[in-house]
Image (cartoon, helix red, strand yellow):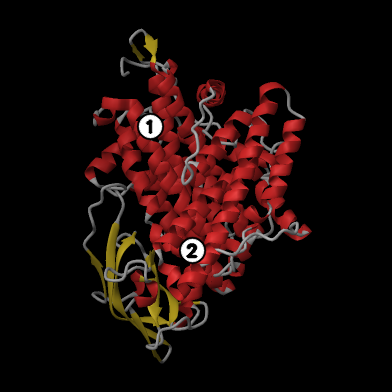
Amino acid sequence: MTVDNMIELAGELEAYLGDPHDDASRIPFSRVLRLDEREQVPHEPLHVLRRWNVHQYCLPDYWGGRAGDVEVGFHLLRLIARRDPTTATALMVTHLAFMPAWIAATEDQGRHYVSEIQRGTRMAWALSERGHGSDVTANETRAEKVPGGYLLTGEKNLIGNATIADVVTVQARTDERGGPGGWSVFAVDKRECPAGSVAELPGERLHGLRAMDISGVRFEGVFVPEHHRIGAQGQGLEITLQSAQVARTVINGLALGAADTALRVTMDFVTRHEIFGSRVVDIPYTRRQLAECFADLLLAEAVGTGAVRALQANPAQASVFSSAVKYFVPTLLERSMAQLSTVLGARLYLREHPRFGIYQKMLRDVLAATFVDGNTVVNLKNIAVQLGGPPKDTEPDSETLERTRTVFDVDRPLPVWEPSKQTLFGRGRNDTLDTLPDGIAGLRALAARSEGRQREWFERAARAGQTLLEELRRVRREGAELRQKMGREHASSAELFRLAEQYCAINAGAAAIHLTVRSADSLPGELPDGAVLLLMVERSLRHFRAYETVTDVDVVDRVMDVAGDMHRRHRLFSHWRFPVAASDGTAGDVW
């Protein structure tokens, strides 16, 4: 889908849903907060989205849906999450539960489950078990082979949609010896199971996403016909890990949407509230806080865009990209929203305020993105074991450069998505980092054709990019030294995990450079901007380097000009020119 088509589609969804501050809109914040307070599943918002056919953009077109590129569903999820991360998550759970079928189903199976979802069937992805958490290879649920199918026995817990789902996708042990080939995946239709053979377990009360159905399911010798097995027997672990790569990438839309609303509510406040005779937005300290949070949001979007598009353009490196973005984006935005909270001050605690109650919900909900579908430790471990040696001195080959350009030029057509091609181990390769020197060169070329302060800021951003490259060499060198010093024990060392954190931050800064350079002509509008990019790259460096914060007031002022323009024009805080339905915030004495 072209950039213009994506912007048009996003505009249609926003116009359909309306201003979330307006109680008469289709999914208003007032209703979202009411459901959250009562811990009620958001059935009505889900029906509203269904009437717009949003689910079609998460189902493959060759089986009857409308999904072509993964990023379309990602952006729509993000726009939904800016209104309610709970509704976005509940919607996403069904499509993640369908993911094993997308990867490994037969033609008949695929068309069947697409048709089911189109008719309103809800699904759950029954992967985790209470005693094993993220260690899926320790799961105890078993599927015993019998004539015509399997007998499924076991318990899954902390599962999204477990109670309300009609179909549950289950990972189960089919070989007592375990190992990579000891697992299979089944689609269990609860409506076809004998009464009492499937029991829903009590739901869990949550800190965030309070209206989500997070519960469990127990199977007591449930017969599952062989044609309900997804993929070959023994292929289950591979399918699970490939599905997880998609989940870890797409879930960041939830965090981006929540952070956008948090920043938008804060901008509404600071541009209208006065203290000591001045608007809050004119206070230098406040401006710096807002500029940094805006840069954080765009930095998160840059690395998220790269990871989402790489699912199609570079599936061989999905293991690295999905883990890096899943660690970095939620961690970054959690910190950023805490920073925004200092700007709101006491208003953060006004629970029933028509403007600030939704901020509190977003602050709670964004935390879920840090642990859903793989927590911080799981993702850092995956990065740590793939840290390669020092970068080669040779230039990247033409194929590597072409893949990077396809990933980061958002107006370039993507190859057809074939999730079965996603590899489980990237062998340390990362095109985003391996082509960073080319991205820096492109940034210098962008500076050369710019004028005035923009030229200066792009040149400074290029120098900051060079610092990223030097830090990348250090991280890879220290990783190699740890392996040599500690042997096999290095893989679980705190030192290697710390290097993995730094690697993810470097990857994010490199993504920001590539997106700016490759999409300079594809995303016309406020961006690209030299000051914004400079602050984005420096924000990536601050995660691990004693790097000076931006002290140049002109940089902060320019970044605030860009953020303020997006705010006034009712656009998503984004590289994309997505319009958002929003009020001017002047109604009533609410500030």
x, y percent for residue 159: 33, 62
> Given the current orientation, which residue lies at the most extreme bottom position?
147
x, y percent for residue 55: 49, 52
Quick one: SS at disc 1? helix
Examine the rendered structure and indicate whether residue 142 appears above or below residue 386: below
Examine the rendered structure and indicate whether residue 348 appears above or below residue 462: above
Residue 375 visible to the viewer: no
Pick the residue in front: 542 or 155: 542
Give me the residue at 62% from left, 61% from top.
390
Quick one: SS at disc 2? helix
Label 1 sits on residue? 340
Kind of residue sitting beneath label 2: Ala
Kind of residue sitting beneath label 1: Leu
Pick the residue in front: 386 or 356: 386
Residue 552 visible to the viewer: yes
Give me the residue at 35% from left, 37% from top.
338
> Given the current orientation, which residue lies at the most extreme top position?
277
The reply, left or right, for residue 272 in relation to residue 295 is left
Q: Nearer the viewer, mark 2 or mark 1?
A: 2
x, y percent for residue 179: 44, 83
Q: Residues within 10 Å of mark 2 (few under 14, many from 20)?
A: many
Q: Marks 2/1: CA distance?
A: 31 Å
Label 2 sits on residue? 384
* Quadrant (top left/top right/bottom left/bottom right) for the C terminus: top left
x, y percent for residue 579: 55, 31
The reply, left or right, for residue 151 in relation to residue 229 is left
Pick the residue in front: 78 or 15: 78
